Image (cartoon, rainbow, N blue to C red):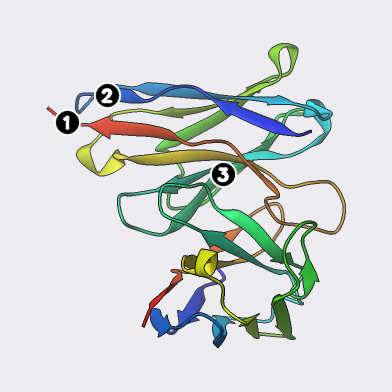
Amino acid sequence: EVQLEQSGAEAKKPGESLKISCKGSGYSFNNHWIGWVRQMPDKGLEWIGIIFPDDSDTRYNPSFQGQATISADRAVKTAYLQLSSLKASDTAVYYCVRPPRGAARAFDSWGQGTLVTVSS
Amino acid sequence: DIQLTQSPPSVSASVGDRVTLTCRASQDIHGWLAWYQQRPGEAPKLLIYAASTLQSGVPPRFSGSGSGTDFTLTISGLQPEDFATYYCQQANTFPTFAFGPGTKVDVK
């Protein structure tokens, strides 16, 4: 069974940085894209970016380029999302997501979400 | 960039109703469209991919259709657990993606 286990909720102050994690299990981590989605309070879903762990090929939503950094550690089968210079508007739930190999081109697996709260 | 619009933004319906939601892309996405359901407090759940393929385990009352720029999600016989928000997502530019703004289905 595919599982994406995310790190716990975070409370940060404006200007601080943050790195949240997503550990994949039940599948070949290196050979599947793994990505991140943001959901601000009572708002819709926004695709942030995605990485292919085997070669670290990374793509970003232009709206998040420069604000978010995605990385992966193949040894521990974990993907990361780093956000720097946090603002109150970064308050959101962040989901890690995985599209399966093949024709699906959709996110069949989701992490449980990590709530990030940015407040002074 | 490919933009997605969804209509209506919200719809009120009753159990047993047939509900049709629409998603329109700003350019031809060659059938690479998925639909998700999100209940409050939960992570989204994949319902349909490649415009019309039902994800494993999803009830057959959900169906998807469309091509080019216009797509629909139909719920035939709305059930109490179907009151939720539905998002479309384009994957023509895989491995980059984009979501639509969502349609909320609530109780009439």
Q: Secondary structure at mark 1?
A: loop
> Quadrant where the C terminus of chain A lies?
top left
Could you tell me how far apart the alpha carbons at marks 2 and 3 are, in whole angstroms?
A: 22 Å
Asked if residue B91 shows in the view, the reply is no
Query: What residue type is disc 3 on?
Result: Gly
Point out the image quarter for the N terminus of chain A.
Answer: top right
The amino acid on which the numbered mark 1 sits, given as a three-letter code, is: Ser
Which residue is label 1 attached to?
Answer: A119
Residue A39 place in picture, x, y as percent: 40, 49
- Name the front one of labels 2 and 3: 2
Residue type indicated by callout 2: Ala
> Residue lying farthest left?
A120
Q: Quadrant of residue B65?
A: bottom right
Numbered label attached to residue A11: 2
Identify the residue under disc 3.
A49
**Quarter of the image where one finds residue A106:** bottom right
Which residue is at a point 72% across and 78% down the rendered structure image? B63
B101 left or right of B89 in image? left
Going from the N terminus, do you reach mark 2 or mark 3 first? Answer: 2
Q: Are marks 2 and 1 in contact (CB under 8 Å)?
A: yes
Q: Nearer the viewer, residue B21 or A105?
A: B21
A2 horizontally vs A59: left or right? right
Which residue is located at x 56 percent, y 72 percent? B79
Q: Residue at x 77, y 57 (%)?
A: B57
Give residue A32's position: percent from left, percent from top. Answer: 78, 37
Residue situated furthest top in the rendering:
A75
Please state which of residues A28 and A31 is positioned toward the viewer in this rendering.
A28
Percent across and percent down for residue B25 are 58, 79
Chain-order first, disc 1 or disc 3: 3
Q: CA distance from mark 1 to mark 3?
A: 25 Å
State the separation of the CA atoms marked 2 and 1: 8 Å
Q: In which chain is the residue bearing label 1?
A: A
